[in-house]
Image (cartoon, grey):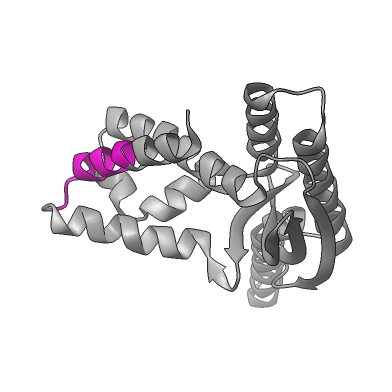
Amino acid sequence: MIERILIQRRVLLAGIAMLGTAPARAQQMDINRATAFVDRAGQDLVNAINDPRLNQTQRRDRVASILRNAIDIEGTGRFILGRYVRQASPAELQDYLKLFDEIIIRNLSARFGEYRGVKFSLGRSQQRTEEDALVSTLVERPNTAPFTLDWRVAEINGQPRVVDVIAEGTSLRLTTRSEYSAVIQRNGGRVAALLDAMRGQITQLAAREGG
């Protein structure tokens, strides 16, 4: 009787262990898949920027669409907001995600530039963990020194998505998380203060871009 109970317990524990590891396997990021995904997104960006048939507005819209399809903007935005996600009201969280979307799209679009002649090439890729891979790229623009962008790619709902961008060794999401947290802390823990700061940032970015 005791032996049978022990056997049943071992079977149950083995089943629980399998259930616990299944999601991790389902979300495992294959480095070749990550590399192909970044290469395709990068070439799409370059083709849109270099397309002579597009005017400035069309080019911006096309670049924004490519970036939104490539990046896990909501997941990244929630990570950056951190523990303040729980403190934000539903309306504040909705506003935050909209503002974050616009900021990240404008910032990354600016890194590629708006004028023809942009080039994009792959560097080396490395498996960070089972869940994500880091794909290094080199971006070249006319009359500007080339720079590196590293794309951290993970499986999100069964699709590869960029979850962080490392520009010249600096993580976008970690740096932004620190900045946003500091703004909230300086203003008594109010998420509304961060939203005001983000609106001001968008105004400055728009003025710099001329629209």
- Quarter of image, res 163: bottom right
Image position, residue 72 (x, y; %)? 60, 44
- Quarter of image, res 23: bottom right
Task: Find the magenta span and give its range.
Answer: 189-200
Image position, residue 5 (x, y; %)? 64, 70
Nearest to the observer: residue 70 or residue 3? 70
Left or right: where 79 falls relative to 26:
left
Dominant secondary-structure state across the stretch colored magenta: helix
Image position, residue 106 (x, y; %)? 53, 40
Left or right: where 102 falls relative to 110:
left
Residue at the location (81% across, 55% down)? 120
On the rendered image, what quadrant is the N terminus found in?
bottom right
Nearest to the observer: residue 176 or residue 161? 176
Nearest to the observer: residue 183 or residue 209? 209
Magenta stretch encompasses residue 193: yes
In the picture shown, does residue 14 fall above or below 102?
below
